[in-house]
Image: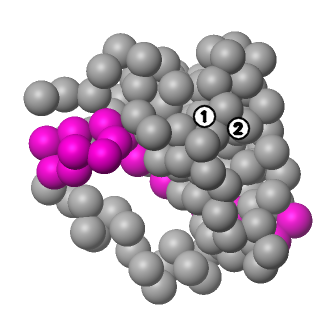
Amino acid sequence: MTASPDALALVAVAARAASDKLADDIVAFDVSDQLVITDAFVICSAANDRQVVAIVDAIEERARIELGQKPVRREGDRDARWVLLDFVDVVVHVQHVEERVYYSLERIWKDCPVIALPADVVTGAGLRHGAAGGAR
């Protein structure tokens, strides 16, 4: 089984919204073969708590505006170190950089297929900080 077209559309919207708010290391995994409760995970990180909240708010807003979807659950707002948006078919994890390194979700889901993100999604801090030729 693979992620549904609706899930893939939500992955693209979430990734774009995260990228627009300068999220780092945006990745998506098709977890549909491993989990029956969701099709895909989107994982990204932010440098500070305020940016975590800004990314989460942007994803939630864009999903509502572009796809008419809102999460059934939003967890982790109080500390803003790891906020989870559960859209049922897609679960979005926005983590502070330190939590991202510590929990290493990519390592846990490394056997799942990676979902290709839209070409306009910037997925790494190096592109913003000059490592690949300048700011975005």
The disc label shown at residue 132, or none:
none
Looking at the picture, how far across and down is residue 123, in whole percent? 55, 45
**Residue at figure coordinates x 40%, y 23% from the top left:** 8
- Per the image, label 2 sits on a secondary structure element best described as helix
Quarter of the image where one finds residue 80 = bottom right
Amino acid type, callout 2: Ile
Left or right for 113, reference 73? left
Looking at the picture, how far across and down is residue 1, in whole percent? 12, 29
- Mark 2 highlights which residue? 59
Question: What span is colored magenta in the figure?
Answer: 32-50
Say few, some or many: other residues with alpha carbon within 10 Å of mark 2 (under 14 / 14 to 19 / 20 or more): many
**Residue at figure coordinates x 48%, y 79% from the top left:** 101
Quarter of the image where one finds residue 133 = top right
Amino acid type, callout 1: Ala
Residue placed most toward the observer, 62 or 135 = 62
- The quarter in which the C terminus is drawn is top right
Res 81 visible: yes
Q: Is residue 108 magenta?
A: no
- Furthest toward the front, the residue is 72
- Mark 1 highlights which residue? 14
**Residue at figure coordinates x 59%, y 58% from the top left:** 84
Res 114 visible: no
Quarter of the image where one finds residue 89 = top left
Residue 43's place in the image compared with 79, above or below, is: above
Residue 91's place in the image compared with 75, above or below, is: above
Left or right for 43, reference 4? right
Q: Are marks 2 and 1 in contact (CB under 8 Å)?
A: yes
Q: Is residue 47 magenta?
A: yes
Residue placed most toward the observer, 24 or 12 = 12
